[in-house]
Image (tube, grey):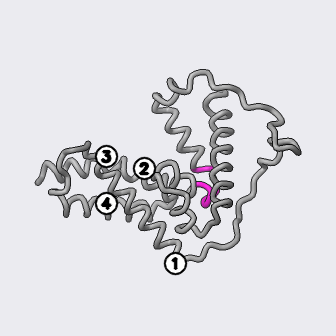
Amino acid sequence: MDDFRSGVERHRPYLLRYASLQLRDKDAAEDAVQETLLAALANESGFGGRSNLRTWLTGILKHKIIDHIRRSAREIALGADEETSDFDALFDSRGHWIEMPAAWSDPDASLAQQQFYAKLEECLARLPAKTARTFMMREHLGCETGEICKELGLTPTHCWVLLHRARMSLRECLQANWFGK
C-alpha cells in the first residue's frame, strides 16, 4: 500500500502541470489532481500494471478534467465569443498566405527536447481561454468535435474555427520563439 501510495504521489507534479495546462486555472487544476489521486488510491486494485502508473493516472485525470469542464459549462453560460485576432493580416483576400511560414528544419529532433515542451506550454498559455480549451480538449484529451461542441456550447463550425486559430497561433508562436531562433 505504501509503495503504491508513494508511487502515486511521485506523479503529482506532472499531473498538476498537465491539469494546469488543460484548465488554465491553478485552483481547478489542484482540485482535479486531488480528485485523481483520491480516485487512484481508492481504486488501487483497478491498476493492474497493464500500463505505466503515470499513464493510468493521466487517464483518470483526463476524465476529471472533462468532468470539470462539464460542470463549468453548466454553471456558467458561455457568452458571445470574446476572441479577437490579427490572423486576417496573415492572409490575402483569397485566403492565401501573404508570407509563407518558414519550413522547420528538423521538427522530430525538436520534439525530443524538453525545452521545446516548455516553449509549447508558453505558447499554449498565450491562447485565448476558449481557444485553448477547445484545442486541449481535441488534441490532448482526444475528445470528438461533437463532444467539444456540446460541452462548450459551440457550433461545429465555430469549433473548427477555434481549432484553426489555435493551430495558426501555435505555429506562429513556435516559429518566433523556437524554430526561428
At horizontal 45% and vertical 53% (from top left) the residue drawn is 141
Residue located farthest toward the top when viewing the structure as drawn = 105
Residue located farthest toward the left when viewing the structure as drawn = 1
Query: Quadrant of residue 178 in the image?
Result: top right
Find out whether the residues at labels 2 and 4 contact each other: C-beta distance under 8 Å. no
At horizontal 62% and vertical 56% (from top left) the residue drawn is 131
Residue placed under numbered mark 2 in the picture: 17
Label 3, label 4: how many angstroms apart (C-alpha)? 12 Å
Position of residue 37 measured from the top left corner of the image (x, y, whole percent): 27, 59
Find out whether the residues at labels 3 and 1 contact each other: C-beta distance under 8 Å. no
Residue 171 lies left or right of residue 117; in this view the side is: right
Position of residue 134 measured from the top left corner of the image (x, y, whole percent): 57, 57
Label 2 sits on what residue type? Arg
Q: Residues within 10 Å of mark 1 (few under 14, many from 20)?
A: few
Is tag 4's residue or tag 1's residue first in the polypeptide sequence? 4
Q: Secondary structure at mark 1?
A: helix
